[in-house]
């Protein structure tokens, strides 16, 4: 069943874990997995208690990318540019939803991630790699152009020169090199545990300030002036909240704050 293709758990307050659960196809982005992913993200986004989401894969892989049998099917009359484009755009947008969520998303990359799977990891705010993780974008060695924002997300994360190397050669970038390049923020033997520890820490932050900070970071792409204009609005918003008073009082008392999101 599609519901079993993605598992959702709540390991600690405010933290939701989404596990891609088709290990028999290395968590390829099949139609079944895409439907289950959308359903899971819908539920988590609607849950007002969500502070952080963690994405990982079951089995030995994080995500092997788009399902090739889904891409290469249909009769000649079905395979038109317009029809393919109309399928591609919703598919891309489904898997890039971490960029649009109002709270941070962490990718716990537990194993190989290929093609569109790399783009899913890049759509997350933070990425941590297991020791067996590797990243590869061999689109042109399948005879296709890169998709799902690869030509924007890779340069954003690692710079144009390294993005060109990944896209032109399709070679495997292992965990140590991914860390050196800035493709991931850290490496851990138990990458899910490490990611959950980071998520639990983030979940302790003021939820209003946290969400506004994620929006502010997106605004920063427009430059310094756009950032300070945003901050001149967002910081006063947080200064009118009860959470601000709780944060200051907790600091003065030397205790952990108890933010309520108001």
Image (cartoon, grey):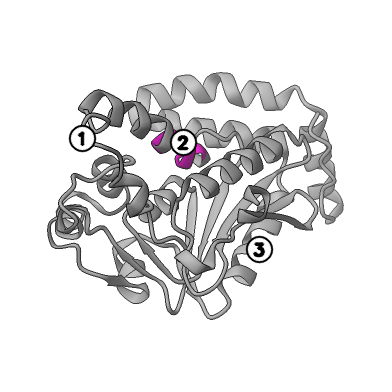
Please report whichever mark, 3 or 1, sits nearer to the chain's N-terminal start: 1
Please determine whether, in this image, residue 204 is positioned above or below residue 11: above
The residue lying toward the viewer, choosing from 72 and 49, is 72
Residue that carries the numbered disc 2 in the rendered image: 217
Q: Quadrant of the C terminus?
A: top right
The residue lying toward the viewer, choosing from 255 and 164, is 164
Mark nearest the camera among 2 and 3 is 3
How many other residues sit within 10 Å of disc 3, few (<14), some (14-19) or many (≥20)? many
Q: Which residues are magenta?
A: 92-97
- Residue 196's mark? 3
Q: Which residue does the image show at 62% across and 48% down from the upper left?
A: 2
- The quarter of the picture where residue 167 lies is bottom left
- Residue 76's mark? 1
Q: CA distance from mark 2 to mark 1?
A: 44 Å
Image-based side of 45 in relation to 144, left or right? right
Mark nearest the camera among 2 and 1 is 1
Q: CB atoms at circles 2 and 1 under 8 Å apart? A: no
Q: Which residue does the image show at 13% across and 62% down from the upper left?
A: 169
**Type of secondary structure dominating the magenta stretch:** helix
The image shows residue 231 at horizontal and vertical percentages of: 52, 25
Image-based side of 207 in relation to 259, left or right? left
Q: CB atoms at circles 3 and 1 under 8 Å apart? A: no
Q: CB atoms at circles 2 and 3 under 8 Å apart? A: no
Please report whichever mark, 2 or 1, sits nearer to the chain's N-terminal start: 1
Q: Which residue does the image show at 60% across and 64% down from the upper left?
A: 195
The image shows residue 201 at horizontal and vertical percentages of: 69, 57
């Amino acid at each position: 069943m599609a519901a079993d293709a993605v598992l959702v758990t709540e390991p600690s307050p405010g933290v939701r874990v989404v596990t891609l659960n088709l290990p028999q196809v290395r968590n390829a982005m099949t139609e079944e997995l895409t439907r289950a992913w959308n359903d899971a993200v819908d539920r988590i986004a609607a849950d007002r208690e969500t502070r952080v989401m963690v994405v990982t894969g079951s089995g030995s892989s994080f995500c092997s990318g788009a399902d090739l049998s889904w891409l290469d099917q249909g009769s000649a009359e079905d395979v038109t540019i317009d029809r393919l484009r109309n399928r591609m755009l919703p598919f891309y947008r489904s898997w890039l939803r971490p960029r649009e969520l109002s709270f941070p998303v962490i990718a716990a990359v537990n194993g190989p991630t290929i093609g569109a799977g790399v783009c899913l990891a890049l759509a997350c705010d933070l990425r941590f790699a297991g020791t067996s993780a590797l990243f590869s974008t061999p689109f042109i060695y399948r005879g296709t152009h890169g998709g799902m924002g690869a030509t924007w997300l890779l340069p954003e994360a690692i710079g144009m020169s390294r993005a060109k190397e990944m896209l032109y050669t399709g070679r495997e970038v292992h965990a140590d090199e991914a860390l050196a390049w800035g493709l991931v923020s850290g490496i851990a033997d138990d990458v899910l545990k490490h990611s959950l520890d980071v998520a639990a820490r983030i979940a302790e932050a003021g939820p209003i300030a946290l969400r506004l900070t994620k929006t502010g970071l997106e605004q920063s792409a427009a430059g310094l002036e756009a950032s300070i204009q945003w901050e001149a609005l967002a910081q006063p918003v947080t200064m009118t909240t009860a959470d601000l008073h709780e944060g200051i009082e907790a600091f003065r008392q030397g205790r952990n704050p108890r933010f309520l999101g108001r």
